[in-house]
Amino acid sequence: MRTCGLLGLLSNGEIAHAGGQIEEPLADAVRGALSSAVHNAAPPVPEFASTESRLAYLRWLAAMSDRLRPKKPEWPVRKEFLETVWYESHRAGLDPALVLGLIQVESNFRKFAVSSVGARGYTQVMPFWTRVLGDGDPGKLFHMQTNLRFGCVILRHYLDREGGDLFMGLGRYNGSRGKAPYPDAVLGARKAWVLAA
């Protein structure tokens, strides 16, 4: 992205107010596993074991599409975004409602959001992750699938580090481990994205 374009976004109130993930040393095995998860080029095309699971997905897509319409009014853009969130969430073993809640809090569904500490995109990934797990190009964090994949893989890593504890894992994701405001905000936002049974 050109510098003038980024400055234009920043001057129009597109700055996100998210905290930043903290760069921590990773064991080689962890770095390898995370890097592999980020680089797997599988496309976000859902596959279903049964007609029932496909129908459940289509119900989810319709419900989430209605809820997301105010933020993404164009159907093709909204559909691609939701399909990718669903795919990347499931790929990382995460609840899509949690991921949508995180995106709402982190960037308010703005693709080009940049926080005061430099986190980028929908899931507000810190640029150091592209060096640790990717090719070092932080500009790729503005690509939808790349950003969602990094965000989901990083969140899964933090949840695993915290033994599945959502509160602590979300705090680690935001760089505010042990403090309530951020996890409470994400868990509160998550409620709006839960599909009623």
Image: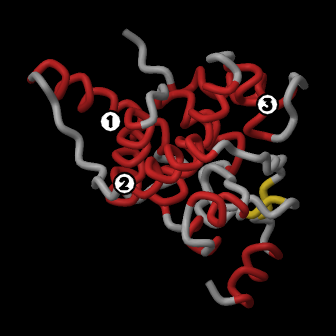
Tell me which colouring the rendered structure shows. Answer: secondary structure
Residue contact between numbered discs 2 and 1, judged by CB atoms under 8 Å: no
Q: Residues within 10 Å of mark 2 (few under 14, many from 20)?
A: few
Per the image, the residue denoted by label 2 is 40
Return the residue found at the far top.
197
Instruction: Point out which mark residue 171 bears.
Output: 3
Q: Earlier in the sequence, mark 1 or mark 3?
A: 1
Q: Name the residue located 79 percent from the left edge and 51 percent from the top edge.
A: 23
Return the residue found at the far front.
28
- The quarter in which the N terminus is drawn is bottom right
Per the image, the residue denoted by label 1 is 61
Q: Secondary structure at mark 1?
A: helix
Q: Is residue 188 visible?
A: no
Above or below residue 2? Residue 62 is above
Q: Name the residue located 78 percent from the left edge and 56 percent from the top edge.
A: 16
Residue contact between numbered discs 1 and 3, judged by CB atoms under 8 Å: no
